[in-house]
Every structure is written in C-alpha cells, then in structure tokens.
Image (cartoon, rainbow, N blue to C red):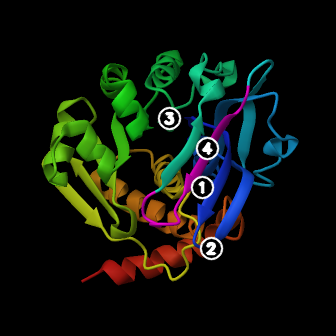
Amino acid sequence: MSLLVTGSIGIDTVETPFGKRENVIGGSAIYFSYAASFFTPVRLVGAVGEDAPGEIFKVFGDQDVDTTGLEVRKGSKTFRWHGSYVKDLNEAVSVQTDLNILAEAAPKIPEKFLDSKYIFLANTHPVLQQQMAASLKKPKLIVADTMNLWINTARPELLKTLKMIDGLVLNDGEARLLTEKKNLIEAAREVLKMGPKFVVIKKGEHGCLMCSGDHIFALPAYPADTVIDPTGAGDSFAGGMMGYLSTQGNVSMATLKRALAFGTVVASYTIADFSLGGLKATDREKIDHRWTQFKQIVDF
C-alpha cells in the first residue's frame, strides 16, 4: 500500500564521542523514507532551499523512494541543525537550529500522491502537519511525530494536530513535557485522551512503550554493540514501523507489535554509523535476519 511521508529535510552537523561530521544530509523525512523503503515504496514530500546540495536528490540510491514531492524553493534556505552527543549518546544537545524553510508554507502534495493510504507526518511544525493531513483524500492511517520545540512553542497547534491523527510517536522526555506526567504509563494514557488511538514512546537505549486503549506493550532496544551516531534513530524506527504496517492491510495489536520490532531493528542499523551510513550498509535480508534474532532474544 502507498506510504507517504512529509517532514524536515535538512543539512546536519553532528558531534559524538567518535567524531564530527559537517554538512551531511539529514532531516526526519530523509531517515524515515530510507528506513521505510526496505519494506514498501515511499512517497516523499518536503522542501529545501536553493542552498541544498545536489546530492540530496541522489541520497536514496536504488531505494524505492519517489521524490516527485521534493520541492526546491527559490529564495529560501534549507533547514539546518547542529547537534552534539559528546556528553551523552542518549540525548542530543542542540547547538544551533535554523528552521529556515520549515518556518514557511508547507510544500504542495503532488496530485498523484493524494490517494496515499498510509501517512507519516514526520517531525515538523504542527501547522504544516495539519495542512498535509487535510489535503489527503481517504487516508487509512495517519501517524505523526513531534519534538520538544513544538511542545514548547506551538502547543495549541500541536493539540489540534493530535485530534487529526491515529497514532503519535515521541520520546520519553517529550511525552513527559507534553503531559506533565513523570510516569510514562500515565503520560501515554494522557496522550490518548488528546486524540490518537495509539501512542508509541521511544526510550532510547531502553527500547519503546506502546499504549492503545487498555493495551500496553513494551520492547527493549536491540542489544547493539556499535553506537556511533544516534541521529535519525527515532525517525528510522518510525520508518521501519510504518513501512511494515503499510504492507499488512490492517492495523491490529499483533501487527503493531511486529511493526515496533521491525522499527527497533532498523534503528539499530542507523546508530552504527554517521548520517545514512548505517542504513546504506544494510538490506531487507539482513533486517529480517536481525528481526528473527531479536524475536528470539525477547521470547520467554
């Protein structure tokens, strides 16, 4: 089934204990699209400025990602982010964030994308997420991501977005910030009251927690022995999750659980190298093999 993603496309500078990379291609929609394309064709909608490097159109290589919806906007500058994980690999410190094009109007969804059934509104301004969701014809599943920036600066708009979606993905700190609840179970239940049918809380090296109705499901992280750069891990997690869900035809608790496991496995490749290096080094066969290993690890 068709999977559409819209979100940030950016130029990153990243520092970790293992080195520094400047001006590498990043952004939530980029990581998500690459991860999801291991499972299903992806339709990417996003915008960059005139300063975007030409290789941004070649970043997916042979992956099945349709970039018809990637707009190069004259007179605009591309979103840029400088983050540091030097003190703690589990938490990025934003050294500098230049929203640039993300503070402008949303990119237009190509007509041929409007029939997309599975939608992921990757991390970007809630108003842009609303505009995208309202443009679609008959979506089957809409899931969104968000971050502390929007919780702090655009909370009223974020709450409107939450009423338009089926699922929300966010990390533990963002869940606590959004709900003012320290306990993550309480926080998840509070999010459900805001509109989504299910919520997935990412906990970094401690895995993830999913709540839907009275159901609670938790998974550990894949026990990775190589962690170089966590940038994009959460977006890759969402990409693996949504990529798998879009192939299943229905969204049940069983498919959601399997999807979270696939997302966890895909993210374990992302963190193994800077930028998209980890994802480029894997394929669906390797992902399936690691998924089987992961299933054995958590089985008891």
Per the model, the C-alpha gap separating discs 1 and 4 is: 21 Å
Q: Residue at position x 66%, y 31% from top? A: 46
Neighbourhood count class around disc 1 (C-alpha, 10 Å): few under 14, some 14–19, many 20 upward: many
Q: Identify residue for label 2.
A: 18
Per the model, the C-alpha gap separating discs 3 and 1 is: 15 Å
Give the secondary structure at mark 4: strand
Mark before the other along the chain sequence, 2 or 3 = 2
At label 2, which amino acid type do we have?
A: Phe
Give the secondary structure at mark 1: helix
Q: Which numbered disc, 4 or 3, marks the residue closer to the eye?
A: 4
Q: Does the stretch in magenta take in 82?
A: yes
Q: Identify residue for label 3.
A: 119
State the predominant SS element of the stretch in magenta: loop
Q: Quadrant of the C terminus?
A: bottom left
Task: Please tell me whether residue 182 is drawn above or below residue 221 in the rendered image.
Answer: above
Depth check: give the residue in front, 265 or 81: 81
Q: Which numbered disc, 2 or 3, marks the residue closer to the eye?
A: 2
Mark before the other along the chain sequence, 3 or 1 = 1
